[in-house]
Image (spheres, rainbow, N blue to C red):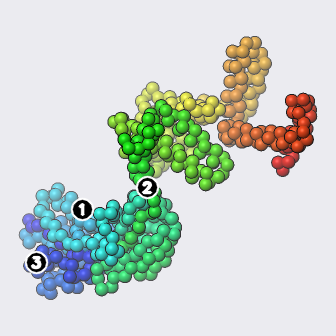
Amino acid sequence: MGTITIVGLGPGNPGCLTREAWAVLEAADEVWLRTAQHPTTTDLPRHVTVHSFDRLYEETADFAQIYEAIADQVLRLAQRPEGVIYAVPGHPLVGEATVQRILAQAEQAGLTCLIVEGTSFVEPVLTALRVDALDGLQLCDAVDLATRHHPPLNPDVPALVGQLYNRALAADVKLTLMNQYPDEHPVTLVHAAGTAEQTLVSLPLYALDRREDLAHLTTLYVPPLPGVASFEGLQNTVAQLRAPDGCPWDREQTHESLRSGLLEEAYEVVDAIDAADLQALQEELGDFLLQVLLQVQIATEEGEFKMGDVIAGIDAKLKHRHPHVWGDRPVSGTDQVLRRWEELKREERGEEHSVLDGVPAALPALQQADLHSRRAARVGFDWTDVGGVVDKIHEEMAEVKAASTAEEREAEVGDLLLAVVNWARWLEVNPEMALRKTNARFANRFRGMERVVRERSLDMAALSMDELEALWQEAKGRER
C-alpha cells in the first residue's frame, strides 16, 4: 500500500512553485490533477504523465458529488505500491474541499498522507491589494457564501472571497453580502493574482455580477465598513464602558437596576413601529440592543454566562422548534406550526410544562390576557364559534351589574375584559394594538378639543357635558 502525496501548485505563476514541490513532481512518473485549468499545469516536468479530474466537472454540477468522487478515486490509486501524487491549485489546505475528504478517509483507511505546501491564492492577492493579512483578514469560499442568507463575516475587518468563478455564482454571493453591506459598498475583483494577466477592478457591490471576466482565478476583496458595524465591535464598546477605566454610571449597573430601562426601550421600539417611523425604529432597536449587551456583559463579568451561551441557546431552540425547516417533518400551514411548537416545548420542559409557561408576568395586562387566550385556544380550550364569545360578554356584563362589593366588581370587570380580549382574537384583532391606537386617537382629539377651548377663551371645567361633546365632535372633524 502506497502513500498519498498532495502537492500545492501555487496560485498560478509557475515561478511560485516551491522547490520541494518541483522536486516531488520531477521525481514522479505520473501526477493526478484536480483540474488542469490552472496556469502552472502547463509547466510541469515534461516526462510526467498528467491526468486530471476535469471530466467529472463536465458530468455533474453538484460539487459535493464531484469532490467525493475525486477523493474516492485518489484513495483507490493510493492502494497501489507506488501510491499517488495528487496536485491541487494553491495550497492544499486553503479552499481545497477534496483534500479535507482525502485526509479524513485516509486516516480511517490507515493510509499515509504527505502535504507538500504551496503558495495559496491569498499571498499574491495581498501583494496586489497592498493589504496586511494580520489586519483581521477573513477568508471564505464563494460557493459556501452563496448558499448562505447572511454572510459569516465581521464587517469591521476586510475579507477575501475566493473562487468567484462565474456570474451566476457572483449573483448569489452579491445577494448574501448585501444582507450585511450597503449596495454601494466598494469592492475589488482581483483576477489571476501574481501572474502576467493580473488585473484589479474596483466596483460597487451591486454591480458584482455584471462582469464578464469572472473566472477560476478571480478573488473578491471586501473592505471593512467605516466605524463600528459588527456585533463584536459593539460588544467591545459596551465592555469598555464597564471596564475599570470606563464610565462610573455603567460600572455601577446590575441586572436589577437596568430592568426599568430594558422595559422602557422595548416600549420605545413598539412606539416607533406604531408610528411607522423607520428612522426612529433603527435608533430604538440600537438602544434596545444596548440593554441586551449590558445585561450579557454583567453576566460575563460575574461568571454567570456569556454571549456565546445566549446565542447558542436561542439558535438551538429555533432549530429544534422548526423541524420543518431544519429537519424532515413537513407542515401544512401556520396552525400546524403552532401546535407542533407547543408539542416541542413540552418535550423540552417535561410533563409539568403548561402552555401558559413563558408568558411574562411583567407584560401589560391586556397583552398578557391575549397571549393566555391564544395559547389556551391552541390546545382546544375555546368557543366553537364567535357567537359563544359574544354571549359570554353579555353574561359578564350582567355579572358586573349584579356585583355588590368593590372586590366583586373588580373581579367581574376583569372577567369582562378577558371576554372582550377573546372576542378580539376571534375577530383577528390585536387588542393591545387596537387599544393603543384608540388611546392615540383619544389623546389627539382631546388635545384638539383643548385647542378649541383655548382659541375661544373658554373654561373647560365650566362647560356642560353636551357642550364638551360638541367640542369633541368639532375636534374630531378637524382631524379630517
* Kind of residue indicated by mark 3: Ala
Q: Secondary structure at mark 2?
A: loop
**Residue 321 visible, this orientation:** no
Tell us which disc is closer to us: 2 or 1: 2
Question: Could you say which quadrant of the image residue 139 lies in?
Answer: bottom left
Question: Could you say which quadrant of the image residue 361 lies in?
Answer: top right
* Kind of residue indicated by mark 1: Arg
Which percent across, then down, holds residue 210?
A: 49, 77
Nearer to the camera, 367 or 416: 367
At 54% from the left edge and 48% from the top edge, which residue is drawn?
Answer: 285
At 49% from the left edge and 32% from the top edge, which residue is drawn?
Answer: 257
Read off the residue under disc 2: 230
Q: Secondary structure at mark 3?
A: helix
* Kind of residue indicated by mark 2: Ser
Q: N-terminal of the two: label 3 or label 2? A: 3
Read off the residue under disc 1: 101
Nearer to the camera, 470 or 249: 249
Q: Secondary structure at mark 1?
A: helix
Nearer to the camera, 441 or 40: 441
Q: CA distance from mark 3 to mark 2?
A: 46 Å
**Residue 14 visible, this orientation:** yes
Read off the residue under disc 3: 23
- Are the residues tagged 3 and 1 within 8 Å (C-beta)? no
- Near mark 1 (Cα within 10 A), the count class, few <14, some 14-19 or many ≥20, is some
Q: Is residue 133 above or below residue 38?
A: above
